[in-house]
Image (spheres, rainbow, N blue to C red):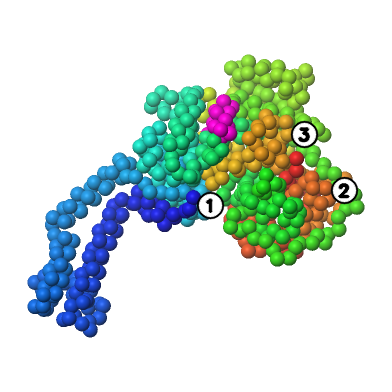
């Protein structure tokens, strides 16, 4: 679909500034009348030889005051033209016309306030329904191509409330720039009339969000919203089936269970002309919590890969005859990762920065005589999960599959919860699938009788032995009590836990305001929140196929999602952060490199194409090699850029030296 950005920009201006739009239109009409009058009197013989400025002044004078100083000619043509000019002035400036314009303005403003005006947008992104993740989506788009991105939100919510919450997100994040190409409509997503009015047929992507919870209607977070989203998905699918457009918008569905996922997947398989994907947010967040517990640095890496603020995952047509190392040798600012059908997956800052060098890069650093066998052993072996919710099954599945894939890794998980969670804990310990990581014959679950004194139950295990502790939010309570348990646990345990510097604390937060509370008290706190999902949805708004790539990166082989026939990647590999000293334990090679490209190719060749470096973590800061917002940060340079502005590694400018305490960010080829 061709972009019509100029038309989109005008539509956004009309919608968000109706009074200013009318003012501009009135001025434009009067200017047109004056120019037309000037053109008419310019042809009169009495005005021959006069300058353009004089002609404009005469035209304006004649329109405003016909009995003024204008010198009339008695020729018929002069009488006709001056009469027309006077009539134009009367139409533009008489009280009747002003009254008509005033009435038109009032009608226009009323239609704008009542969302009755039909938008004429193309290639825009539509968000149907509203919840707490939407502000994160909007925030992320301010780091994308803002000139070519347009968002319309249609929800049965107060428009001003939505705009205020989006503004609050910018205030919390401290964003220096704001995304302005946005239209918010208060309407019914299940109404064909309302969908027509937001030009859904011409949209690029439509995001179907889980509706928020209405406390005034007595709803709590326990209210099942999946059926509402199922109905909306079927309605939107029907809507597009009635469209005569050759192009049909992509559909991205926010799901909370596998049933809705299955429905969307089956629709996609039956309708090849329309892409439809479902994002099971419990699964995505559960996998992120699991991988963060094992490799805390991945949390920062994924913030780059999930957000337009950092690098992105791109899928583009590529010459399938070129290997990764062959394409990398001529790439200037992107990292080719693997092939997906006839397309290749890249990691890059911007899709417009897919530059290639004229000279092929030749690896001059000598490869080791003996192939390096990557030692992917992680230091996190004892993990405590405090609390239960819908994400816990995915956390345990991911940890179990991770242990199966990296069999040299010792991993033990202990579950803890309150008295009302005991039956749920028993169920997990009785499940044969989790026997390897829960080890019920040696360790039992822990019951915390008093959440205000959790150390009585967790004792020295949490304070001195645990490598990672995950605090889960209770997703079966009202909005008022969201994040209550993890906040109390975290507050009571943090002093004793932080005496042991080896323990990483991961807190799941559902309310972004609670996230800011924790960050104010401890900047080093590891937080996994719905912000991840907001960034992910923003990515999918541009290309839904990125879902399979990102899921694959955080999924170990054997995970249920690797059995999805719709997933073309089929576990192409995993993103990991490995300690440099441990990873290169079996070699004494010099780990000094003259450029990022040399580091990438050397490790890739030395490990027989098993490990593809994409970045490095130094001092706790992740630097992804494909960043290009600095002119000197191409792959053949040593400049390392972090996700935040001004976050530049100021080490040796002539070389990149991997230190023992560093972590190498790699795509482990599956």
At 13% from the left and 75% from the top, the residue drawn is: 78
Instruction: Where is residue 290? Give x, y as percent.
Output: 67, 33
Which residue is situated farthest in the bottom direction here? 49
Sort mark 1 into few (<14), some (14-19) or many (20+) by Cα contacts within 10 Å.
some
Q: CA distance from mark 2 to mark 3?
A: 21 Å
**Which residue in the structure is indicated by mark 3?**
405
Q: Which residues are magenta?
A: 254-270
Question: Which one is in front, 116 or 380?
Answer: 116
Q: Is residue 112 left or right of residue 659?
A: left
> Which element carries disc 3, helix, strand or loop?
helix
Q: CA distance from mark 1 to mark 3?
A: 36 Å
Above or below for 344 versus 376: below
**Which residue in the structure is indicated by mark 1?**
144
Are the residues tagged 1 and 2 within 8 Å (C-beta)?
Answer: no
Question: Which one is in front, 29 or 509?
Answer: 29
At 65% from the left and 29% from the top, the residue drawn is: 394
At 58% from the left and 46% from the top, the residue drawn is: 307
Instruction: Where is residue 185? Give x, y as percent.
Output: 37, 41
Question: Can the viewer see residue 148?
Answer: yes
Sort mark 3 into few (<14), some (14-19) or many (20+) by Cα contacts within 10 Å.
few
Instruction: Where is residue 192? Give x, y as percent.
Output: 38, 35
**Which residue in the structure is indicated by mark 2?**
371
Question: Based on the displayed image, in which of its 4 quarters is residue 88 positioned?
Answer: bottom left
Are the residues tagged 1 and 3 within 8 Å (C-beta)?
Answer: no
């Amino acid at each position: 679909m061709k972009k019509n950005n100029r038309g989109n920009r005008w539509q956004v201006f009309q919608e968000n500034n109706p009074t200013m739009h009318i003012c501009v239109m009135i001025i434009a009409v009067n200017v047109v009348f004056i120019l037309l009058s000037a053109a008419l009197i310019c042809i009169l013989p009495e005005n021959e030889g006069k300058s353009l400025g004089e002609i404009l002044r005469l035209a304006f004078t004649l329109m405003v005051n016909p009995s003024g100083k204008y010198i009339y000619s008695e020729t018929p043509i002069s009488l006709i033209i001056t009469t027309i000019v006077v009539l134009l002035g009367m139409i533009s400036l008489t009280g009747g016309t002003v009254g008509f314009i005033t009435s038109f303005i009032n009608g226009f403003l009323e239609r704008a306030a009542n969302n009755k005006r039909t938008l004429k947008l193309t290639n825009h992104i539509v968000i149907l329904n509203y919840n707490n993740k939407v502000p994160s989506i909007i925030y992320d788009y301010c780091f994308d191509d803002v000139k070519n991105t347009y968002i319309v939100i249609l929800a049965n919510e107060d428009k001003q409330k939505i705009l205020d919450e989006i503004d609050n997100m910018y205030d919390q994040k401290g964003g220096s720039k704001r995304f302005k190409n946005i239209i918010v409509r208060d309407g019914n997503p299940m109404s064909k009339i309302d969908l027509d009015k937001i030009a859904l047929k011409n949209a690029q992507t439509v995001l179907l969000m889980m509706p928020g919870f209405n406390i005034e209607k007595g709803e709590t977070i326990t209210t099942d919203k999946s059926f509402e989203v199922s109905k909306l998905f079927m309605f939107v699918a029907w809507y597009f089936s009635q469209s005569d457009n050759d192009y049909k918008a992509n559909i991205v569905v926010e799901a909370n269970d596998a049933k809705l996922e299955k429905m969307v997947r089956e629709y996609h398989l039956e309708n090849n002309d329309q892409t439809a994907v479902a994002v099971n947010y419990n699964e995505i967040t559960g996998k992120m919590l699991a991988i963060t517990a094992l490799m805390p640095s991945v949390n920062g890496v994924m913030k780059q890969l999930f957000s337009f603020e950092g690098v992105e995952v791109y899928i583009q047509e590529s010459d399938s005859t070129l290997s990764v190392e062959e394409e990398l040798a001529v790439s200037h600012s992107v990292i080719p990762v693997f092939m997906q059908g006839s397309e290749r997956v890249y990691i890059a800052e911007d899709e417009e920065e897919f530059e290639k060098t004229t000279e092929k890069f030749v690896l001059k650093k000598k490869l080791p005589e003996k192939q390096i066998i990557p030692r992917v052993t992680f230091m996190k072996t004892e993990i405590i999960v405090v609390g239960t919710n819908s994400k816990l099954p995915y956390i345990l599945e991911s940890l179990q599959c991770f242990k199966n894939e990296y069999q040299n890794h010792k991993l033990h998980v202990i579950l803890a919860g309150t008295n009302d969670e005991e039956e749920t804990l028993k169920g997990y310990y009785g499940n044969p699938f989790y026997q390897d990581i829960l080890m019920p014959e040696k360790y039992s679950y822990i019951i915390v009788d008093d959440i205000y004194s959790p150390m009585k139950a967790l004792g020295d295990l949490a304070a001195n032995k645990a490598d990672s502790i995950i605090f889960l939010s209770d997703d079966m309570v009202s909005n008022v009590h969201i994040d209550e348990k993890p906040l109390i646990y975290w507050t009571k345990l943090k002093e004793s836990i932080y005496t042991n510097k080896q323990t990483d604390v991961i807190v799941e937060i559902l309310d972004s305001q609670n996230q800011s509370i924790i960050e104010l008290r401890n900047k080093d706190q590891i937080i996994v929140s719905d912000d991840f999902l907001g960034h992910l949805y923003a990515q999918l708004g541009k290309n839904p196929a990125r879902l399979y790539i990102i899921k694959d990166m955080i999924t170990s082989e054997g995970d249920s999602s690797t059995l999805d026939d719709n997933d073309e990647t089929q576990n192409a590999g995993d993103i990991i952060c490995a300690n440099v000293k441990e990873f290169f334990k079996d070699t004494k090679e010099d780990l000094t490199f003259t450029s990022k490209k040399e580091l990438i190719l050397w490790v890739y060749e030395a490990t027989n194409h098993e490990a593809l470096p994409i970045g490095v973590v130094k001092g706790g800061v992740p630097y992804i090699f494909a960043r290009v917002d600095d002119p000197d940060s191409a792959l053949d340079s040593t400049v390392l850029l972090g996700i935040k502005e001004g976050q530049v590694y100021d080490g040796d400018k002539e070389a990149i030296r991997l230190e023992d305490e560093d972590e190498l960010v790699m795509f482990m080829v599956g």
